[in-house]
Image (cartoon, helix red, strand yellow):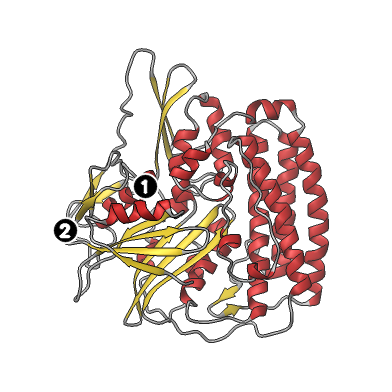
Amino acid sequence: MNIRTIESTINDLLSVVKSQITLGFGLASMYVTEPNATKLRTLEVIMISETEVIRISSVLEKPEFPSLTPYVPAAGIYEREISEMSKVVPINHPDMRLLKLRKVYDDGYPLQKSTLEGTFRDVGIPQNDMIGEGIFEIPVGPIHAGVIEPGHFRFSAAGEPILMMHTYLGYKYRGMEKLFETPVEKNNTRLAERISGDNAIAHSMAYLQALESDTEIPQRAKFIRTIYAELERMYYLMSGISGIALDTALAVPAAEGYALKETMLRLNQEVSGHRMLRGTFRPGGVRRDIDDDTVEKIESGMVHIKLDLENLFEIIISSPSFLDRAETTGILTNDLAMKLRTVGPVARASGVKYDVRKSHPYAAYDKIKMRVPTETTGDVAARLKVRKEEISESISIITQCINTIEPGDLFCNIETKDGVHIGMTESPRGEVLHCMHVMNGNIWRYKIRDPSFPNWPAIEYAVLGNIVPDFPVINKSFDLSYSGNDL
């Protein structure tokens, strides 16, 4: 992927970022690199438009910089992460709640190059700063009923309406970015697959894109990667639809949806050897071919899934009880979705017509036709409709790939040069971004931006004014990854 680099001083950074926003760019990632023997740290800002990716790099003379957040709300969560992970302080940041760490080092920080020394210090979860007569605080989690990852939600409510909600995650922090700091020739595909388990294909493909920046991989491998990416999208989105149905008390449609997801997982097993499609990619291409028998299984599966999906969706959307729970619930306005630069179905349900596959094609997406489903109401119902339409679009993409793919090599040798490389994919949850700094043949800094990361701040706004019992269905309609955030 081609990246345009802009050098900026820290003092000029805000004006540079604001000027790019006026040109249609959105802030997609921020992070700090560690110093080496020849230069100081740099603050890296990645901005993306419909047609271009730019990197704004600023040298840090001191472990601090003027916060962008008061002027660019999307920067808020990234600056909180920078403070925690790199111990670089965004001055005048309006909300410095800890983001990932439930314990901190007094004399170190997780991304430093030297060994961490000193002692751990527990970090408690503060009370919300909203007080008054009739206002109650409701702590939920981090341990939840059912099979769900840990996260703490702290509500302030007057009766049932929610006045404030703060999220506290980080219970699954694993130090993933540090684990990628290896010689560049080491194959970290398996590690990338485990960043967020149900988006394994999307993350591994983003990693491989960064690794293959200087290589053109075979066309057949590109088409096979595209097929796997859409199979992952289908089973994941089907799980989200079923979860929304379950949380709106539609038990039978939910069961049918989960059965349809199981059908997808079994198809994945037959096609790739793994229910969640892991182990299918390798640097330079793919590990296994798709033969005629496999193509026949995929085509047959697509026909049945499309029919079953249409029937299931009609049952859900025609239910008055569902519409009563879903319409006007958990609204994320278009303006807020844009300011926070949310991504994926969450953003598209609020009218943001952006999809990496369309704007920045990778794999074989430049060889097929696709549309970007959007809704405008930004509520639970809109997020359900977008997911349904995206499954239908995935079926179309897979069919086009099968009809277009030609014989050819499955992989090639690659070489990754020193420099900054970016991999970007559209996962089922939205835009995935991997930034890799290679120095002397080693990965010096690896930055992962899961799509859930910019979407978590949005749910704190979407719940406001809704009643506490509607939080589970709003949360499910956002369907965010805890481990993807925590890394």
Q: Amino acid at mark 1?
A: Ile
Secondary structure, mark 2, is loop
Percent x, y for residue 329? 58, 29
Callout 2 amino acid: Lys
Q: How far apart are labels 2 and 1 at the CA level?
A: 21 Å
Mark 2 neighbour class, 10 Å CA radius: few under 14, some 14 to 19, many 20 or more: few
Residue at image point 46% right, 61% down: 433
Report the side of 186 relative to 358 (left or right): left
Q: Is residue 133 visible?
A: yes
Q: Residue 174: image x %, image y %?
A: 39, 58
x and y, in percent, of residue 266 in the image: 72, 60
Q: x, y percentage for residue 15?
A: 30, 53
Front residue of this view, candidates 133 and 438 = 438
Q: Which residue is mark 2?
A: 62
Task: Indicate left or right for 120 with 321 as reference.
Answer: left
105 in relation to 299, above or below: above
* Numbered tag placed on residue 77 in the rendering: 1
| Image-based side of 93 in relation to 414, left or right | left
Whether 288 is drawn above or below 413: the answer is above
Horizontal side of 375 relative to 34 (left or right) equals: right
